[in-house]
Amino acid sequence: MKKWIRLTLFLLAFQMEVRVRASGDLIEQPSSCLKSKEACAIQVTGNAFHLIQDSVKIHAPANTALMRLNSQQWRLIKGTLWVEKGSQISLETLYGDLTATQGQYWVVDQGNRILVRNMNANLVVTLRDGKTLNVPEGFEFWMSGLNSQGKSEFGMIQPIDMKEHLPLWNSLYGGSKESFIKEVVHLRENWGDLAEKSSVIYQGLVERKIASEAEKKKQLEEKKARQAAELRQMRELYRQRVFER
């Protein structure tokens, strides 16, 4: 087994409605707000944070800051968030919002951009300019701020970099080593040939770009035709006024 697949066992300090790694490693504002339904700000100061509450199951490493705005709306301020279960919530980030009707996904704040990794979710990302992206299982992409044209910057949808992702995933995984390996293998088998899927996605983008360029050309030709017709009409009106008075 590759060296980067290693086990990290998680010891939970207490279990009520909410489970966290250790009481001294989490700052809640207001105090103990996770035990209630009120708005809550969370700062993970030490070991990983794990929340299992109602229909929500999320995990975050140290140096992550979150806000629970209400029971169905969360916001990632900084850090990393693994949404293992969250079909009833929407997640806000600086550069876009995420919703998933099922499955799990990851969001990683990289400073000037946000990395989104879809493990097996039915995931939709709405960028700040209103554009929506459906991210396939097994793929990732980054999103960033608005450019000078008011359009959101984002990267190509491409297969998840598992060599980079596995240590992060393993560090937050709460089960056994065997369970972790089985889940990784199961996901990869379900994903199928990501290289082939990437080719299909790229071909679709190329075809849409060609169609878009063709539509722009058609609109330009129609505009020129309208302008030519208007010019002919103006010349005819001028001729009538000058020579047919």
Image (spheres, grey):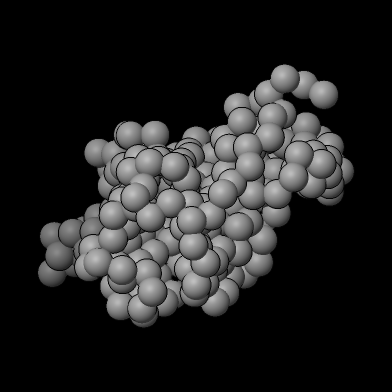
Q: Nearer the viewer, residue 107 or 200?
A: 107
Residue situated in front as seen by the camera: 223 or 211: 211
Which x, y percent locates residue 240?
Answer: 21, 64
Task: Decide: is 39 above or below 10.
Answer: below
Does residue 200 appear in the picture of this structure?
no
In the image: residue 204, left or right of residue 10: right
Residue 149 locus on image (x, y percent): 28, 43
Of all residues shown, which one is farthest toward the front?
13
Res 146 seen here: yes
Hey, which quadrant is residue 30 in on the image? bottom left
What's the residue at 60%, 64% (across, down)?
85
Q: Please name the residue shown 49% across and 62% down the image.
A: 14
Left or right of 185, for residue 162: left
- Res 87 quadrant in image: bottom right
Looking at the figure, which quarter contains the N terminus? top right
- Number of numbered callouts drawn: 0
- Extreme residue toward the bottom, this view: 37
Q: Nearest the camera: 192 or 5?
A: 5
Rendered residue at 30%/78% (across/down): 38
Write the residue at 56% across / 49% down.
11
Quadrant of the snapshot with the C terminus: bottom left
Residue 4 position within the rendered picture, expressed as x and y whole percent measured from the top left: 68, 24
Q: Nearer the viewer, residue 194 or 54?
A: 54
Residue 217: % across, % down: 50, 44
